Amino acid sequence: MAIERTLSIIKPDATRRNLTGKINAKFEEAGLRIVAQKRIRLSLEQAGKFYEVHKDRPFYGELCEFMASEPVVVQVLEGEGAIAKNREVMGATNPANAADGTIRKEFALSMGENSVHGSDAPETAAVEIAYFFSGLELVG
Ligand code: ADP
């Protein structure tokens, strides 16, 4: 399988509870390498643009406010089949449905406050990585 890169976000519910290290350990144990990482505070407008694909969903406003409420850690994960592997390590969107051992099963608080974001396809990964990082910031 090809080496891929994917965009990951450690969301405000997790940064607030000091879970960045524990979540990063899950990525690294799964063979994903953190090739870029920074802690930032998103404006409401930046969060809105990032989640634009969901703009017609009923939870859009709540989601954007949550993402802008406290700092997030944005990162690029690299590895074989990194996009699918990251989604596997994250677990299902709703923590009630997430498999044992996944990040969302262990740490998520609710469907909205579910600790992590991960790109869902190569095309979205490319767009999402470019939204936060320049090529010079990616150190494989
Ligand atoms: P995922 O993050 O697993 O790819 P989606 O792309 O469907 O999930 O949704 C993006 C994010 O929007 C979710 O991670 C979650 O934070 C939020 N979300 C999704 N569905 C709901 C919902 N029904 N109620 C509240 N928030 C939601």
Image: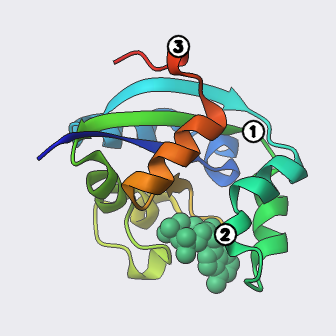
Mark earlier in primary sequence (3, 1): 1
Please give the residue where the numbered disc 3 appears in the rendered image. Answer: 136
Please give the residue where the numbered disc 1 appears in the rendered image. Answer: 71
Mark earlier in primary sequence (2, 1): 2
User: Residue pushed farthest left?
Assistant: 1
In the image, is the residue at mark 1 within 8 Å of ligand 1 by its beta carbon?
Answer: no
Q: Amino acid at mark 1?
A: Pro
Residue 117 horizontal side relative to residue 97, left or right: right
Q: Circle 3 sits in a helix, a strand or a loop, which is it?
A: helix
In the image, is the residue at mark 2 within 8 Å of ligand 1 by its beta carbon?
Answer: yes
Q: Circle 2 sits in a helix, a strand or a loop, which is it?
A: helix
Mark earlier in primary sequence (3, 2): 2
Image location of residue 1, percent across then percent down: 11, 47
Image location of residue 61, percent across then percent down: 84, 72
The residue positioned 73% from the left and 83% from the top of the image is 57
- Placement of the C terminus among the 4 image quadrants: top left
Q: Is residue 122 above or below residue 29?
A: below
Q: Circle 1 sits in a helix, a strand or a loop, which is it?
A: loop
The residue positioned 45% from the left and 63% from the top of the image is 104
| Ligand 1 location (quadrant) | bottom right
Please give the residue where the numbered disc 2 appears in the rendered image. Answer: 53
Image location of residue 133, percent across then percent down: 59, 28
In depth, the one of 17 and 128 nearer the eye is 128
Q: Is residue 58 visible?
A: yes
**In 3D space, how far apart are the residues under numbered discs 3 and 1 (Cα atoms)?**
23 Å
Q: Amino acid at mark 2?
A: Val
Q: Amino acid at mark 3?
A: Leu
Residue 88 horizontal side relative to residue 135, left or right: left
**In 3D space, how far apart are the residues under numbered discs 2 and 1 (Cα atoms)?**
22 Å
